[in-house]
Amino acid sequence: MLKQEEDKKHLLRKDKEYVKFTQLLRRAEREGRLDGTFTCNLCGMKYHSIEEASGCCKVPVT
């Protein structure tokens, strides 16, 4: 019995789930910002197309 209690003390516990973080993570995956093949040269964010990646950190001049 004591051995089981000691083993439970060393188990990893899952932190509480943060809903906003999970939503943002799913959105980033959906938009290809995590697993995209093209990256922005300035910030490193990933995209599915080269056009999106090259236009990521461009500042529009008006």
Image (cartoon, rainbow, N blue to C red):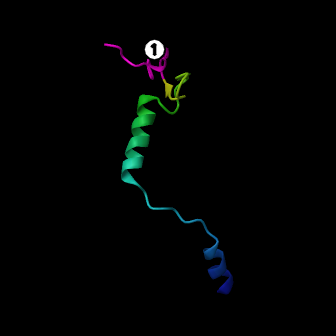
Q: Position of residue 28 (x, y in %)?
A: 43, 35
Label count reads 1
Does 50 sit left or right of 23 as displayed?
Answer: right
Q: Position of residue 18 (x, y in %)?
A: 40, 55
- Residue furthest right in the image: 3
Q: Position of residue 1 (x, y in %)?
A: 64, 86
Residue bounds of the magenta highlight: 48-62
Query: Of residues 62 and 50, which is closer to you in this image?
Result: 62
Q: Position of residue 50 (x, y in %)?
A: 49, 15
State yes or no: residue 39 in magenta: no
Does 45 sit left or right of 11 as displayed?
Answer: left
State yes or no: residue 59 in magenta: yes
Screen quadrant of the C terminus: top left
Q: Residue at x 62, y 81 (%)?
A: 5
Q: Residue at x 39, y 37 (%)?
A: 27
The rendered magenta stretch, by its main secondary structure, is classed as loop
Query: Within the image, what quadrant is residue 61 found in?
Result: top left
Query: Of residues 39 and 26, which is closer to you in this image?
Result: 39
Structural crowding at the residue carrying mark 1, measured as other residues with C-alpha within 10 Å and reported as few (<14), some (14–19) or many (≥20): few
Query: Would you name the residue on which mark 1 appears?
Result: 51
Task: Look at the picture and state if 3 lies above or below 20.
Answer: below
- Residue furthest front in the image: 62
Query: Within the image, what quadrant is residue 39 found in?
Result: top right
Task: Look at the picture and state if 29 lies above or below 51.
Answer: below
The type of residue carrying mark 1 is Glu
